[in-house]
């Protein structure tokens, strides 16, 4: 039996040394992948990216208000957003007329996965797990031009939406790279307080710029950490992802290029695209040093975005 192995790597810098995350692509049995007319039916990276973007788009709310007023919006989950129209600028000039605001909120790890919005923050050159109090995208536009701000807008997030009030929460800003992956940096110019004096305790944020925002804290795990190597079927690399879900914690999701604690009780989840749906497999794992996991297509399930979201959120 002939094996096919291809190597894909990303560099991770941690503990003052250079380590490597390597995704090995291998197949031990032709039955592990589908064959159509003698050729492997392999999805493209763009096909998976389209699934993530489609789910993200389905969560997008479009709010409208006049720039000579204040937008006060309360989401169905109880998050309140306030933007002062007088602080908006279009190409450096005060804005006049109607403004559109794109608004997205994400709280659960199932939706984090189906949108590819993981909670990994940059810490000393590594990407490490964050516990989230909510991920948000907020962007004001006019005539398809992104607007800027001269004063911050406010966001109040009920702490009950992510399992209750957490101490040590900090503001983070997010950036999406060319691969569609979202990365978080602590935002030192943002203000965030945990207000428990109100009838509904909230994380209250003042945010000086539009884009992705998250209130989080690093997981705080101590001890040795490890990268993850995933052995997946031949032909799967950039067209697939390996996600990490921590057991018993509903609002955190990692991806295999992160750095994770040895001994972490978790699930590793293989995700790719199949005929416009998600194809996935879930494996319970306890992480070991230089952790390795193997996925075969024979273990996978094909599901819609909503079905996969439900499956991930149902994990104990």
Image (cartoon, rainbow, N blue to C red):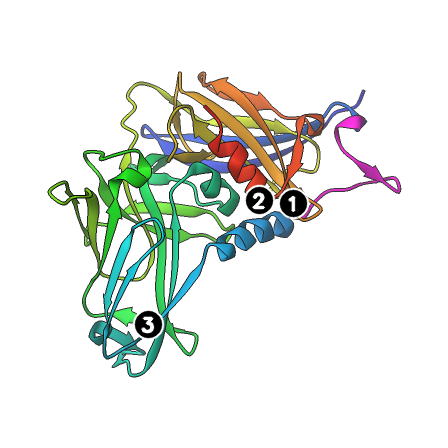
Residue at the disc numbered 2: 305
Residue at the disc numbered 1: 277
The residue at 53%/51% (across/down) is: 55
Q: Nearer the viewer, mark 2 or mark 3?
A: 2
Residue 35 shown in magenta? yes
Left or right: where 290 falls relative to 54: left
Q: Residues within 10 Å of mark 2 (few under 14, many from 20)?
A: many
Q: Quadrant of the C terminus?
A: top left
Nearest the eye: 128 or 290: 128
The residue at 22%/42% (across/down) is: 170
Asked where in the image residue 248 lies, by quadrant, the reply is top left
**Residue 147, numbered circle:** 3
Could you tell me if the residues under marks 2 and 1 are in contact, i.e. CB atoms within 8 Å?
A: yes
Asked where in the image residue 155 lies, by quadrant, the reply is bottom left
Point out residue 126 in the picture as x, y percentages from the top left corner.
35, 36
Does residue 256 appear in the picture of this structure? no
Task: Give the distance between the C-alpha atoms of the residues marked 2 and 3, in whole angstroms.
Answer: 31 Å
The residue at 53%/26% (across/down) is: 229
């Amino acid at each position: 039996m002939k094996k096919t192995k291809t190597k894909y790597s990303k560099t991770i810098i941690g503990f003052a040394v250079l380590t490597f995350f390597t995704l090995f692509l291998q197949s031990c049995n032709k039955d592990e992948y589908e064959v159509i007319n003698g050729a492997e039916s392999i999805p493209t990276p763009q096909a998976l990216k389209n699934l993530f973007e489609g789910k993200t788009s389905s969560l997008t709310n479009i709010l409208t208000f006049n720039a000579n007023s204040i937008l006060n919006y309360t989401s169905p989950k109880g998050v309140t957003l306030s933007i002062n129209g007088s602080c908006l600028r279009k190409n450096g000039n005060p804005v006049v007329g109607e403004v559109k605001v794109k608004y997205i909120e994400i709280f659960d790890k199932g939706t984090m996965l189906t949108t590819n919005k993981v909670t990994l923050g940059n810490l000393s050159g590594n990407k490490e797990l964050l516990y989230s109090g909510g991920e948000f995208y907020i962007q004001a536009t006019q005539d398809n031009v992104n607007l800027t701000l001269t004063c911050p807008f406010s966001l109040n997030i009920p702490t009950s939406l992510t399992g209750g009030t957490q101490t040590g929460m900090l503001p983070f800003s997010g950036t999406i790279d060319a691969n569609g992956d979202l990365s978080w940096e602590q935002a030192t110019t943002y203000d965030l307080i945990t207000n428990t004096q109100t009838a509904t305790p909230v994380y209250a944020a003042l945010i000086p710029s539009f884009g992705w925002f998250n209130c989080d804290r690093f997981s705080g795990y101590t001890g040795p950490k490890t990268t993850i190597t995933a052995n997946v079927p031949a032909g799967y690399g950039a067209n697939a992802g390996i996600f990490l879900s921590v057991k018993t914690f509903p609002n955190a999701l990692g991806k295999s290029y992160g750095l994770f604690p040895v001994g972490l009780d978790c699930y590793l989840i293989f995700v790719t695209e199949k005929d416009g749906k998600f194809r996935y497999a879930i494996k319970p794992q306890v992480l070991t040093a230089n952790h390795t996991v193997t996925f075969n297509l024979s273990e996978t399930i094909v599901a819609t975005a909503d079905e996969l979201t439900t499956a991930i959120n149902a994990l104990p």
